[in-house]
Amino acid sequence: MSEPRYEVLGPLGPREVGDVAEHERPETLRGRRVAYLWDELFRGPEMFDVISQVARERHGEVEFVGWEEFGNFHASAAEERRVLDALPELLRAHRVDLVVAAVGA
């Protein structure tokens, strides 16, 4: 009797984005506009409050754009695609300099 054989599907999907070039980091956040992106899985609003407070204490004038402006990028496949497709234009429209992407566990 032979052992049964099973086809296996790996949990990782195909890679959609290639390597991203690293950009020089700014020396300060003063005068910058920072966007928060969140997948709505783990304590984002609490963490964003702490990050905002510390950033302002260290750098002075820093503006933040809330995650609500961008949507949940970890939703149903259709919603996720819609959010990600709209993201570049939304970041431009909000004049975002930097992004904090919070991904929960």
Image (cartoon, rainbow, N blue to C red):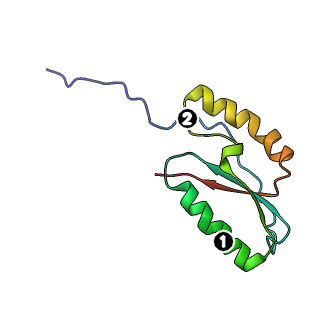
- Relative image position of residue 35 (x, y in whole percent): 73, 54
Question: Is residue 104 placed above or below 63 in the rendered structure?
Answer: above
Residue 27's quadrant in the figure? bottom right
Q: Could you tell me residue 79's position as x and y percent? A: 62, 29
| Amino acid type, residue under disc 1 in the picture | Gln
Q: Residue at x 69, y 40 (%)?
A: 17
Image quarter of residue 9: top left
The disc labelled 2 sits on which kind of residue? Answer: Ala
Position of the N terminus, as image quadrant, is top left
Decide which of tag 2 and tag 1 comes sooner along the chain: 1
Q: Is residue 24 above or below residue 17?
A: below
Q: Nearer the viewer, residue 32 or 14?
A: 32
User: Residue at position x 86%, y 51% from top?
Assistant: 95
Q: How many marks?
A: 2
Query: Residue 84 placed where, x, y %?
Result: 69, 37
Asked which secondary structure carries label 2, the reply is loop
Other-residue count near label 2 (Cα within 10 Å), few / some / many at <14 / 14–19 / ≥20 = some
Give the crowd class for mark 1: few <14, some 14-19, many >=20 residues within 10 Å: few
Q: Nearer the viewer, residue 47 or 22?
A: 47
Mark closer to the observer (2, 1):
1
Are the residues flagged by discs 2 and 1 in contact, CB closer than 8 Å? no
At 54% from the left and 46% from the top, the residue drawn is 40
Who's the residue at 54% across and 61% down the image?
A: 46
Q: Is residue 62 above or below residue 82?
A: below
Identify the residue position indicated by label 2 in the image. 75
Name, please, the residue furthest toward the left.
1
Q: Of the numbered discs in the image, which one, if any, rests on residue 53?
A: 1
Q: Residue 79's mark?
A: none
Question: Which SS class for mark 1?
Answer: helix
Residue 52 coordinates in the image, percent (x, y): 67, 67
Q: Residue furthest top?
A: 1
Q: Is residue 12 above or below residue 50?
A: above
